[in-house]
Every structure is written in C-alpha cells, then in structure tokens.
Image (spheres, rainbow, N blue to C red):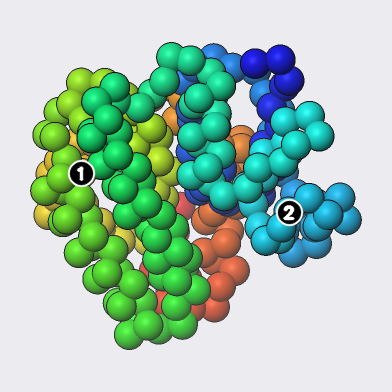
Amino acid sequence: MSKKLELISFKLCPYVQRAVIVLNEKGVDFDLTYIDLMNPPQWFKEISPLGQVPILRIGDEVLFESSVIQEYVDEVTPPSLHPKDILVKAKNRAWISFGSEFGHLVYKMSQSKDEKSFRAPYKDLLAKLVILEDAHSGGNFFNGGDFSLVDAAYAPMFMRFNLLKETCGIEFLANTPKMQAWSDRLLAMDCVQKSIADDFVKIFRGMLGNVNGYLKGKIKNS
C-alpha cells in the first residue's frame, strides 16, 4: 500500500468504526479526520456523493459506503480477515449486510419520544439478535476461532448496546448467550477499544441526554 489512507467520519458513527478496527488489528498507519455533520466543510460536500460518512481517501481517490471501505481496507492490507472458503466468505458478507440496519435501529431508539415509539425498533433489534444467535458458531468469534471482518462489523454495535445498558438500563443480550460471550470478547480486544475517539463515551451519553425523549428519562445518575 503506497498511499496513506484517510478515513473521514464523525465521532458517533458506528460504520467507520468497522474500518478502524480492521486497520488497528493489522497495525496499519492511517489518518482519521472527524467532521461536524451538522456543519460539514465544503471540501467534504464536494467528495461525498451521498453527503454521508464514512469516506475513505486514497490520495486523490475517494470511496464511500462502509462495507465497500471495509472490504478495500482488508484487500490492500494482507493477510485478509475474510475466511478462505469462498462460500463461508460469501455468507459472512451476507451477515455483515444483515447487521447494517442495527445502527439505524439504535438511532431510532435514541430519538424515540415515548415508550411506544421506542418499543418497535427495540423489538426488531432483539428479533434480529436471536437470528444472529442461531448463525453464530458458538466459538470465540463468529466463524469459530479466528477474528474476521464480520466480527469487526458487529463490534461497534455491541459497544453501543453495552453503553445503553450501563447508561439507561436497557438490556439487549440477556436471552442470547452466544451474543453476550461474543460481545464480551470483542469489547476486550485492543483493536476495538482503540477504535473510538477519547471522548466517545461522553458524547454518546450526552447525545442521549440531549434528546427530549424516552431514553433521557432512563439515564442513571452517576
């Protein structure tokens, strides 16, 4: 890899975190630039076709869409974190896609004005976790003993589930023991712990408190 990579995101984005985890795991030097999505700089508007993050800059070239960025990062920084078996690799890609809605559901929950509007995305998320529980190997990681891209894709969401439990008492994994064990292992990994900004937890909790909705009333005093 001849050109240094630059990831562009904002501090609460779970999707750029996927690529950061992969880069951290592989020990690759890269730049991470945070922007304010409420007031994005002009240069960002010019390079982001969808006006969304994450964006990956490789010299003068630009990539968008988190799953595409994650795949590119993996391919240019061998060895690959995808399984060698072609069918297993394809299935992993499908499960990465399956988890892409998790972030949107968490966002809907965080913006819910009352318990009724909170319950719909919450129940949807729990149902998806049961499906994922059945697909998980039961080993240390999704496929068994080796850390893969699919593990990197879900780690950001487990981090947010854990924070919502600590901050608001919302439980996600009580009925999915394989998910709980997977979460515990991923969140203990150095590549995951170092994939967020230093003030991420403070900003995340502040975001919950700033929304005048259901979760604000459940924030625990600390």
Marked residue nearer the N-terminal end (1 or 2)? 2
Q: Is residue 21 above or below residue 64?
A: above
Which of the image's four quarters has the N terminus? top right
The extreme right residue here reads 42
Q: Residue at the spot x=34%, y=72% of the render?
A: 121
Q: Quadrant of residue 158?
A: top left
Q: Residue at the spot x=50%, y=36% of the render?
A: 70
The residue identified by callout 1 is 179
Q: Which percent across, then down, holds residue 212?
A: 54, 78
Answer few, some or many: residues within 10 Å of disc 2's Cα (few below 14, many 20 plus, some between 14 and 19): some
Q: Secondary structure at mark 1?
A: helix
Q: Which percent across, then down, holds residue 190?
A: 44, 22
As shown in the figure, which amino acid type bears the numbered disc 1? Met
Q: Is residue 81 above or below residue 172?
A: above
Q: Secondary structure at mark 2?
A: loop
Between 102 and 186, the one nearer to me in the picture: 102
Q: Which percent across, then down, holds residue 35?
A: 75, 49
Q: Is residue 89 above or below residue 65?
A: above
The extreme front residue here reads 86
150 lies left or right of 47: left
Which numbered circle lies on residue 48?
2
50 lies left or right of 179: right
Q: Which percent across, then down, holds residue 156?
A: 43, 43
Any part of residue 135 in sight: yes
As shown in the figure, which amino acid type bears the numbered disc 2? Ser
Q: Name the front one of labels 1 and 2.
A: 2
